[in-house]
Image: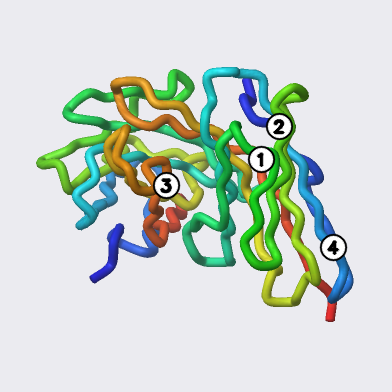
Amino acid sequence: QQQVKQSPQSLIVQKGGISIINCAYENTAFDYFPWYQQFPGKGPALLIAIRPDVSEKKEGRFTISFNKSAKQFSLHIMDSQPGDSATYFCAATFHPNTGNQFYFGTGTSLTVIP
Amino acid sequence: DTAVSQTPKYLVTQMGNDKSIKCEQNLGHDTMYWYKQDSKKFLKIMFSYNNKELIINETVPNRFSPKSPDKAHLNLHINSLELGDSAVYFCASSPPTGTEKIYNEQFFGPGTRLTVL
């Protein structure tokens, strides 16, 4: 089953607006929550990540909000730009002896209209 | 100086053929992965391979098999290709668990677009 649930599937935002993507998880063994950004024809690349001991992390226009009790986290893109148009994946990880294990959400296709 | 590389970038082949996709990482990571991304952009984990231990996603057909000649390489072999295998395949790697730096980051290759006719 899908270990990390992501919504919305697609999002259209005007330039300068705020883009918000939400994710939820169930497994309390997860201890690291990265967001990946994927441009067409490229592999996903790490955008920003958070550990569950903090409620918010901000890097430039990108902010992760984390609610441990609700098992939810979200990505906020402030002042969205056309160059932010991409597919965004949330993920959750844990670390058995067999190596880091990653569970990805289903992705959100973001389009920022000029 | 590409971190994770894959070859070929495009692969077009007929149903029933056997093909391989190569992956190499020069990051010194100890865990490598293969993902399948379908037309809806879903990223499905197929395998993870760590210190010679393989973890298989149980939904992956046994026509798919990873082969690791050494720590820096994890190749994907596909036998008896089917139309439904058409997708983009990504290789990725991550550092050892517990490494102080961003130990959870996963680095992806550029992808191989497989088209089965």
Q: For the residue labelled by badge 4, is the local secondary structure a helix, a strand or a loop?
A: loop
| Residues at marks 3 and 4, CA–CA distance in whole angstroms | 26 Å
> Which chain contains the residue that carries disc 2?
A
The answer to the question of whether label 2 and label 1 lie on touching residues, with beta carbons closer than 8 A, is yes
Residue denoted by label 4: A18
| Residues at marks 2 and 3, CA–CA distance in whole angstroms | 20 Å
Of labels 4 and 2, the one closer to you: 4
| Residues at marks 4 and 2, CA–CA distance in whole angstroms | 21 Å
| Residues at marks 1 and 4, CA–CA distance in whole angstroms | 21 Å
Q: Nearer the viewer, residue B9 or A112?
A: A112
Residue denoted by label 3: B105
Numbered badge on residue A13: none
Q: Give the quarter of the image for residue A71.
A: top right
Residue at 37% in and 54% down: B13
Residue B106, percent across and down?
A: 41, 47
Numbered badge on residue A5: 2
The answer to the question of whether label 1 and label 4 lie on touching residues, with beta carbons closer than 8 A, is no
Residue at 74% in and 32% down: A67
> Are the residues under badges 1 and 4 in a single subunit?
yes
Mark 1 or mark 4: whose residue is earlier in sequence:
4
Mark 2 or mark 1: whose residue is earlier in sequence:
2
